Image (cartoon, rainbow, N blue to C red):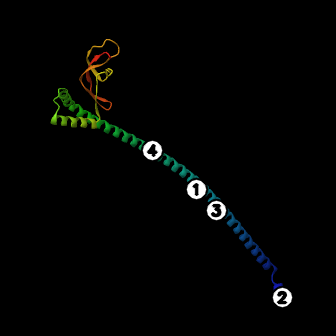
Amino acid sequence: MSEDLNQDPGVASEDVVADAASADTAAAAEAAETQGVDEGLADTEAAVVDAEGVNNDDSNSIEAELAERTEDLQRVTAEYTNYRRRVERDRESVITGAKAEVAAGLLPILDDLEMAEQHGDLTGPLKSMSDKLHSVMASMKVEKFGEEGDEFDPTCHEAVQDTSSGDDKVLAAILRRGYRLGDRVLRNAMVIIGDPQ
């Protein structure tokens, strides 16, 4: 104890100063560390904000691209639907045109068979052939038109003689039957026009 008392007071103050300096250094280090943590937090928050901004930009660009792709898909789907309808309409038109061409080629045979029937010559195998031909034409939906007494229609009747005296005109005589396939007239009926009776 006497040694402690005899110790040099300058040495003791140096120890205290050293202890104080190390305490200040520790406090400074702790403050720097805290400031570093705060700066790190600030940097992290800034990075998160930047990431959110980038995410929002990415999200907006993805939504815009999705909308564009959806619009493209809808346009392509509409074009394909229109194309399919057009092809179907063209196909039906070609089929109807082919039927009309075949039916128009058979009309002279029908005329001859009708003339044979008017003269009483349509018997036996000829009658059987006539019946089959008429059933084929019916299956193709070919209809004959132009009966005596029908009202005259210049769009489907071809008048070769007009014996009428008034404004009302009807078919007085049928010289050649007319035929139609659906709405298409294959051949106009050749008629003589007369007055209604």
| Sooner in the amino-acid sequence: mark 2 or mark 4 | 2
Marks 3/4 in contact by CB < 8 Å: the verdict is no
Q: Secondary structure at mark 2?
A: helix
Q: Secondary structure at mark 1?
A: helix
Would residue 31 appear left or right of 133 to someone viewing this image?
right
Question: Mark 1 highlights which residue?
Answer: 51
Give how far across and how far down residue 52 sits, in percent.
59, 54
The Cα–Cα distance between marks 4 and 1, rounded to whole angstroms, is 34 Å
> Given the image, on which type of amino acid does mark 2 rest?
Ser
Which callout, 3 or 1, points to the residue nearer the camera? 1
Label 3 packing within 10 angstroms: few (<14), some (14-19), many (20+): few
Which callout, 1 or 2, points to the residue nearer the camera? 1
| Sooner in the amino-acid sequence: mark 1 or mark 2 | 2
The Cα–Cα distance between marks 3 and 4, rounded to whole angstroms, is 50 Å
> 94 and 43: which one is in front?
94
Quadrant of residue 187 within the rendered picture = top left
Residue pushed farthest top? 165
| Sooner in the amino-acid sequence: mark 4 or mark 1 | 1
The Cα–Cα distance between marks 3 and 1, rounded to whole angstroms, is 16 Å
Label 4 packing within 10 angstroms: few (<14), some (14-19), many (20+): few
Label 2 packing within 10 angstroms: few (<14), some (14-19), many (20+): few
Give how far across and how far down residue 71 sits, in percent.
47, 44
Quadrant of residue 170 within the rendered picture = top left
Question: Mark 3 highlights which residue?
Answer: 40
Would residue 167 appear left or right of 135 to someone viewing this image?
right
Q: What number is the disc on residue 16?
A: none
